[in-house]
Image (cartoon, helix red, strand yellow):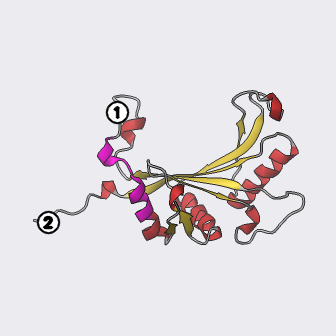
Amino acid sequence: MKRKDNPMRDIVIDKVVINIGVGEGGEKLRRAAKVVELLTGKTPTYTKAKKTIRDFNIRKNLPIGVKLTLRGKEAEEFLRKALWVRDFKVPNYSFDSTGNLNFGIPDYTEFEGMKYDPDIGIFGMDINVVFRRRGGYRVARRRIKRGKIPARHRVTREETMEFMKKEFGVKVLEVE
């Protein structure tokens, strides 16, 4: 009898996080939030400074950036738009050892259908994609009898690269 592949070992997108670090509060921060809202249709949350840096005029708990987390179909749709901006090419150093993908986009106007608005300006963003296996991640997040995810169930860098090639048609560039 032939054994079928386990569907619980399939790799899926857990979440896509969009981050714009402005470095200061005020009007510039509100314009960055407007950019994220234009791209996704959702309201982002503000990130705060963890410590005071006098040289940069940053105080602890001062809002200095915006971020937004997308999950499910919305995450997949936004990822396709972001990869279109990058011509579906990602360098191999964008994948980390735990199977996550991180890349940046220098200007939001490169997205399809976006035009330059002088009231907003130019903002770049970081996009982080977290992958997981379909089953078994509850072990690390449940309240009772919490445990570690075994190494055989973690997503590796190579598996993530193969997933992106197969599902999104991404070309992974070999950069040394």
What residue is disc 2 on? 2
Q: Amino acid at mark 2?
A: Lys
Q: Residue 141: horizontal and vertical position, in percent?
A: 42, 36
Q: Is residue 159 magenta?
A: yes
Q: Picture quarter containing residue 159?
A: bottom left
Q: How many marks?
A: 2
| Residue at point 51%, 69% (across, down) | 170
Residue 155, above or below 23: below
Label 1 packing within 10 angstroms: few (<14), some (14-19), many (20+): few
Label 2 packing within 10 angstroms: few (<14), some (14-19), many (20+): few
For residue 147, the mark is: 1
Q: Is residue 139 magenta?
A: no
Residue 109, above or below 130: below
Residue 137, above or below 158: above
| Residue at point 81%, 40% (across, down) | 24
Q: Is residue 167 left or right of residue 104?
A: left
Q: Are marks 2 and 1 in contact (CB under 8 Å)?
A: no
Seen from this angle, which residue lies furthest front?
176
Answer with mark 2 or mark 1, whichever residue precedes in sequence: 2
> Gap between marks 2 and 1, in whole Å?
32 Å
Start and end of the magenta stretch?
150-163
| Residue at point 77%, 29% (across, down) | 53
Task: Give the structural element (helix, strand or loop) at label 2.
Answer: loop
Seen from this angle, which residue lies furthest left?
1
